[in-house]
């Protein structure tokens, strides 16, 4: 059952408690984690280790932001499940699951490249409920709720967002990325796709944060995005932002997308068929 902000919940003891506002809690989580990351970034106050490979990095700031978000979510919604990149999965009983990337763009963060984000999504099964992608260095909160659209929140401003209506690849600015598995010959590296797309488009950006790439598609700063071998926390919030901003999200094979899928393509309805068609031609 999808629970809405303000609904009263019956506890096991039969008492009624108010349901916290999911958007407000998610914003507070993103803001707190963003402030923590910005402080660590400004002071170069973090340690760096590796996970799956020498290029798959994790920092003490990732883990601190993860703890900040998960602690707040668990306190506000003790019956919700949580899937967070650094702390893993926690079970819940409400049917709702938070999908959290506390620091999307860790490589950028460790190198002092000022482009990274906090990503928080809420799903009811495979259906998106809410998504927030927060850029702490620019003070931008990209927010979306099912049925309520997508907007950019900066201070007291709330500006509605829409994907572009760009109709052709040659007029488009796209984004993509390359997975940590790109040196594995058994996995698609995306290099052939990148090379094939470059002559067909106005430009391609590889900025290093999938969550922000998707938020930028929702905001009309990019026309489209594709990438292979992503994890649910990379895409969950951003995909909802695109959909609620009038865009379309599919797998690269053109099938229905959900957070368990490892590939994603996102664009306005005018452009996505051309993007998927061009990618399908790559051997």
Image: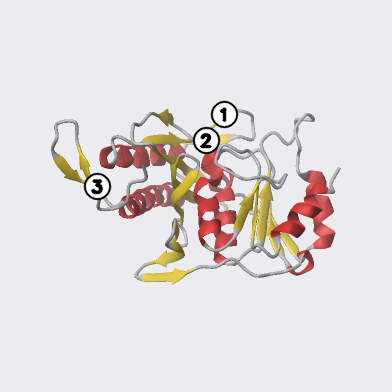
In this view, 270 is above or below 97: below
Q: Is residue 25 rendered to the left or right of residue 160?
A: left
Pointer 3: what residue? 19
CA–CA distance between discs 2 and 3? 34 Å
Residue 43 in sight here: yes
Q: Position of residue 42 (x, y in %)?
A: 44, 52
Q: Earlier in the sequence, mark 2 or mark 1?
A: 1
Pointer 1: what residue? 51
Q: Which tag is nearer the camera, tag 2 or tag 3? A: 3
Q: Earlier in the sequence, mark 1 or mark 3?
A: 3
Pointer 2: what residue? 58
Q: Secondary structure at mark 3?
A: loop
Q: Secondary structure at mark 1?
A: loop
Query: Residue placed at 69% from the left, 65% from the top?
Result: 270
Q: Is residue 9 rendered to the left or right of residue 215?
A: left
Q: Position of residue 30 (x, y in %)?
A: 39, 50
Q: Position of residue 65 (x, y in %)?
A: 40, 42
Number of on-image labels: 3
Quarter-of-image position of residue 214: bottom right
Between 12 and 217, the one lying in front of the other is 12
Marks 1 and 3: CB-CB under 8 Å? no
Q: Position of residue 171 (x, y in %)?
A: 75, 69
Screen quadrant of the C terminus: top right
Q: Earlier in the sequence, mark 2 or mark 3?
A: 3
The image's colour scheme reads secondary structure
């Amino acid at each position: 059952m999808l629970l809405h902000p303000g609904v009263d919940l019956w506890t096991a003891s039969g008492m009624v408690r108010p349901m916290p506002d999911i958007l407000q809690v998610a914003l507070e989580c993103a803001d707190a984690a963003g402030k923590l990351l910005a402080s660590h970034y400004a002071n170069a106050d973090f340690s760096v280790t590796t996970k799956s490979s020498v290029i798959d990095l994790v920092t003490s700031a990732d883990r601190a932001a993860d703890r900040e978000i998960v602690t707040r979510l668990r306190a506000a919604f003790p019956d919700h499940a949580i899937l967070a990149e650094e702390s893993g999965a926690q079970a819940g009983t409400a049917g709702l699951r938070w999908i959290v990337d506390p620091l999307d763009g860790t490589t950028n963060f460790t190198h002092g490249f000022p482009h990274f984000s906090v990503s928080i999504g809420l799903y009811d099964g495979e259906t998106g409920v809410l998504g927030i992608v927060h850029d702490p260095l620019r003070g931008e909160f990209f927010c979306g709720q099912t049925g309520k659209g997508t907007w950019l929140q900066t201070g007291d401003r709330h500006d509605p967002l829409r994907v572009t209506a760009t109709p052709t690849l040659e007029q488009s600015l796209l984004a993509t990325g390359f997975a940590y598995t790109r040196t594995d010959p058994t996995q698609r590296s995306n290099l052939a796709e990148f090379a094939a797309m470059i002559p067909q488009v106005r430009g391609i950006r590889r900025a290093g944060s999938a969550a922000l790439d998707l938020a930028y598609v929702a905001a009309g700063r990019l026309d489209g995005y594709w990438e292979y071998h992503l994890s649910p926390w990379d895409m969950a919030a951003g995909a909802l932002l695109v959909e609620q901003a009038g865009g379309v999200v599919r797998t690269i094979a053109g099938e229905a997308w959900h957070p368990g899928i490892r590939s994603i393509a996102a664009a306005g309805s005018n452009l996505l068929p051309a993007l998927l068609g061009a990618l399908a031609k790559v051997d």
